Amino acid sequence: MNPLASQKSTRHQPAVNAPSTAPQIPEPAVQTLTLRQPDDWHLHLRDAATMAAVLPYTARVFARAVVMPNLRPPITTVDQAQAYRDRILAALPPGVAFEPLMTLYLTGATTPAQIDAARASGFVHAVKLYPSRATTNSDAGVRSLAECRAVLARMERLDLPLLVHGEIARADVDVFDRERLFLDEELAPLQRDFPGLRIVLEHVTTRDAVQYVEEAPGRVAATITAHHLLYNRNAMFLGADGAAGMRPHFYCLPVLKREGHRAALVAAATGGNQRFFLGTDSAPHPRAEKESACGCAGCFTAPLALEMYAQAFERAGALDRLEGFASNHGADFYGLPRNSGTITLRRQAPAPLPPITALGQEIAVLPVHDAAWSVDAVTPAAGA
Ligand code: DOR
Ligand code: ZN
């Protein structure tokens, strides 16, 4: 479906034989945009009351989401994934169709038999690699890929994708270089040793990662978040009216990078390359834990995620490429059917959000001030 075909425009059509002196009427921009319903290929839903508070925002817009397993304790077995999936389905608002695509958390103790069970389950769609200590709830993560070789070989054989948090988490590596170093030190050897393994490099943040994914042999793709398309690292250090300040709400991992990297991400997302697709990395945290002496990493973007992506694509003059990125490329990479429902965005600032709370604590939403699009209507697939 070509979204431009369904854009309703108030575009003024000049009369065929209009005299050349006719006044120039500026062309108003398109007012609505209808897309195939999108999926979120990287999402943190948490659990219990927090999940119940945040899930409706994703399920309102996205038909499916790849659900990250970094709970405490992490989701490491198919039985745990099944129970977590059941809790997600039970927390959905009545009448909302949404399919959670489950993942397992890779550890040094994961066995090939667990990969067999994951593949056979039908609901576990990938395994997530967190380098130990790289990010939120990653202490159970992998210390060395050498301890996972049998598991990776089985994933390659059964064609179960590996999702990668691509950062070297050594203390001596500069925070802003962690993704770039991961490419040469970990990802290239991984691909060389397991050339058939399907890999998603999650939430890429650098032009180096973009270039790697564009040029790599084999079956590698990448997700890109909305906040990494809209903001560079200055956003973490801007106070009111451009003065100095520190903004913990813009802190996530991998951390926002400098402007040239953001521009490379926009070019990748809007360029039509099927290896790049939407993954919000929406990661809710209580406001008190973001605004603290040691603020935690993660941006909760689910309430306005598609609106933010539309903003980034419009600024790049590429609204016609949004559907491929948001609704087609990810499904094709995972070998899943594209959705058959549609979603319509309207050129209109989104309504203010109500406070989102769980267990009496407010959840911090990434502040978005200048969104020009809002979700207007969702028409799920017939029978969904
Ligand atoms: O900023 C992040 N937050 N990056 C991650 O990789 C994890 C996430 C979270 O779970 O909060
Ligand atoms: Zn994440």
Image (cartoon, grey):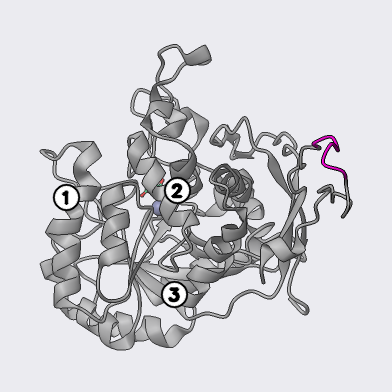
Residue beneath disc 2: 266
Whole-percent x, y for residue 116 in the image: 33, 86
**Residue at horizontal 61 percent and vertical 53 percent from the top:** 319
Is residue 312 left or right of 221 when viewed as pictured? right
Range of magenta residues: 19-24
Secondary structure beneath label 3: helix
- Mark 1 near ligand 1 (CB under 8 Å)? no
The tag on residue 225 is: none
Q: Is residue 106 visible?
A: yes
The tag on residue 181 is: 1
Point out the image quarter for the C terminus.
Answer: bottom right
Q: Please tell me which residue lies in front, 149 or 227.
A: 227
**Circles 2 and 1: CB distance less than 8 Å?**
no
Can you say whether 121 is above or below 283 in the image? below
Instruction: Name which of mark 1 and mark 3 comes first in the sequence.
Output: 1
Secondary structure beneath label 2: helix
Can you say whether 327 is above or below 151 in the image? above
Residue beneath disc 3: 333
Is residue 136 left or right of 313 when viewed as pictured? left
Point out the image quarter for the N terminus.
Answer: bottom right
